[in-house]
Image: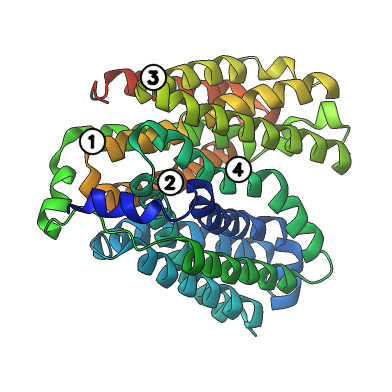
């Protein structure tokens, strides 16, 4: 019996959705943890007796550690059973959050964030490769969308909830995320069967890194996220004309964007199962570029901004799942490594987009950052069109 047949027999024991649910829970925890610190910086800075700039390095340290560790740990654990890899990753992630919550000083908290990022990076690669392995090929896109749904739910609801909890004590949020890690680990242990990837030597798994198409697809992922976060990072000042500086109005717009993300993620999974993934990526990037170019028209009226945010959320989320499908279809045995690299490309795009928006917002004004975001997304579309034609 080959590896694929063995996995198929094991997955018949429980419904596919039941096996995907703990994977989505793990991504929900990672998504909440990865972005929540930014919303708690004033409380953290005051508690640890450091400046806001130093507290902000907790976000940078997490992102850099995630980007570096995800492909490395993905490669080192690529031959490990996916359930074991996930349980290991969740253990590291949970311990990192506990250490952050207990950290008595800035250095301890910073090191704890690095440890947490290492676990988070491995969770992403292991969860997506597990979902791709247990799903039939005709349902792979939808399976990846279910797992990705955990991350989009974190964006839409986890971050506001975490910020609300952290308003009383920022450490409570980290305890809550650690609890999510424990819950996900229990689900993995209970619902996910052992999942073995195709048995190849590590050298064979690393072989795709010599292929130009890998770096082309990674560039598409980076540019997609960079284009999004050029504007999203500074969405508050960009929409000041529409929200009037009201935190409640801004929350409504962000929730609209998050709902759009959830819709787009669900649609992307179905489209990736019916059409070539590269076509779905192309359509999503083209639509996102158009909506971003129109953003200066949406920043003066709250109703228009909400409608625009939903559409933008749908479009920017369309390329994510098809990108993952492309890696899995091209190199199944290297999926853990390639999906780890793709996760790194996501965080690199987030960092580059935020940096570009910060450097250029004075020249463009925040309300016109959407034009820069549209240009970056357009470059991503051109790279995608020039990338490998399959899949």
Q: Are marks 3 and 1 in contact (CB under 8 Å)?
A: no
Q: Residue 326: horizontal and vertical position, in percent?
A: 32, 33
If you read the primary sequence from the N terminus, does the residue marked by circle 1 or circle 2 appear first?
1
Residue 152, which numbered label? 4
Residue 3 appears in view: yes
Classify mark 1: helix, strand or loop: helix
Query: Nearest the camera: 217 or 322?
Result: 322
The span from disc 1 to disc 4 (Cα, nearest Å) is 25 Å
If you read the primary sequence from the N terminus, does the residue marked by circle 3 or circle 1 appear first?
3
Identity of the residue drawn at 43% across and 21% down? 280
Q: Quadrant of the N terminus?
A: bottom left
Query: Nearest the camera: 238 or 92?
Result: 92
Q: Residues within 10 Å of mark 2 (few under 14, many from 20)?
A: many
Res. 215 image quadrant: top left
The span from disc 1 to disc 2 (Cα, nearest Å) is 23 Å
Residue hosting label 1 = 330
Residue hosting label 2 = 348
If you read the primary sequence from the N terminus, does the residue marked by circle 4 or circle 2 appear first?
4
Looking at this view, name the residue that lies furthest to the bottom: 104
Residue 275, which numbered label? 3
If you read the primary sequence from the N terminus, does the residue marked by circle 3 or circle 4 appear first?
4
Q: Is residue 264 above or below residue 198?
A: above
If you read the primary sequence from the N terminus, does the residue marked by circle 3 or circle 2 appear first?
3
Classify mark 3: helix, strand or loop: loop
Q: Residues within 10 Å of mark 1 (few under 14, many from 20)?
A: some
Q: Nearer the viewer, mark 3 or mark 2?
A: 3
If you read the primary sequence from the N terminus, does the residue marked by circle 1 or circle 4 appear first?
4
């Amino acid at each position: 019996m080959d590896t694929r047949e063995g996995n198929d027999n094991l997955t018949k024991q429980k419904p596919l959705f039941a096996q995907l649910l703990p994977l989505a829970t793990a991504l929900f925890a990672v998504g909440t943890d990865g972005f929540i610190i930014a919303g708690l910086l004033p409380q953290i800075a005051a508690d640890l007796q450091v400046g806001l700039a130093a507290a902000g390095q907790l976000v940078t340290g997490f992102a850099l550690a995630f980007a570096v560790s995800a492909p490395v740990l993905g490669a080192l654990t690529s031959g490990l059973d996916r359930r074991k890899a996930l349980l290991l990753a969740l253990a590291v992630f949970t311990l990192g959050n506990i250490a952050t919550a207990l950290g008595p000083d800035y250095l301890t908290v910073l090191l704890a964030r690095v440890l947490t990022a290492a676990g988070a990076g491995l969770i992403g690669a292991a969860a997506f490769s597990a979902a791709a392995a247990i799903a039939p090929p005709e349902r792979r896109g939808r399976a990846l969308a279910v797992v990705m749904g955990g991350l989009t739910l974190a964006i839409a609801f986890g971050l506001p909830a975490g910020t609300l909890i952290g308003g009383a004590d920022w450490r409570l949020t980290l305890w809550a995320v650690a609890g999510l890690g424990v819950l996900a680990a229990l689900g993995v242990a209970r619902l996910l069967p052992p999942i073995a990837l195709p048995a190849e030597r590590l050298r064979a798994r690393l072989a795709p890194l010599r292929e130009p198409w890998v770096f082309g697809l990674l560039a598409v992922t980076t540019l997609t996220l960079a284009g999004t976060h050029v504007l999203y990072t500074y969405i508050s000042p960009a929409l000041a004309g529409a929200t009037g500086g009201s935190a409640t109005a801004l929350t409504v717009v962000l929730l609209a964007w998050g709902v759009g993300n959830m819709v787009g993620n669900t649609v992307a999974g179905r489209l990736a199962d019916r059409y070539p993934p590269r076509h779905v990526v192309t359509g999503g990037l083209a639509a996102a570029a158009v909506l971003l170019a129109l953003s200066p028209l949406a920043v003066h009226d709250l109703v228009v901004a909400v409608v625009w945010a939903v559409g933008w959320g749908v479009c920017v989320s369309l390329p994510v799942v098809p990108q993952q499908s492309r890696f899995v279809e091209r190199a199944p045995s290297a999926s853990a490594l390639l999906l780890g690299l793709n996760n790194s490309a996501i965080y690199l795009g987030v960092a580059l987009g935020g940096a570009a928006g910060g450097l250029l917002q004075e020249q463009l004004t925040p309300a016109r950052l959407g034009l820069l975001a549209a240009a970056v997304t357009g470059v991503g579309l051109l790279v995608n069109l020039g990338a490998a034609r399959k899949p």
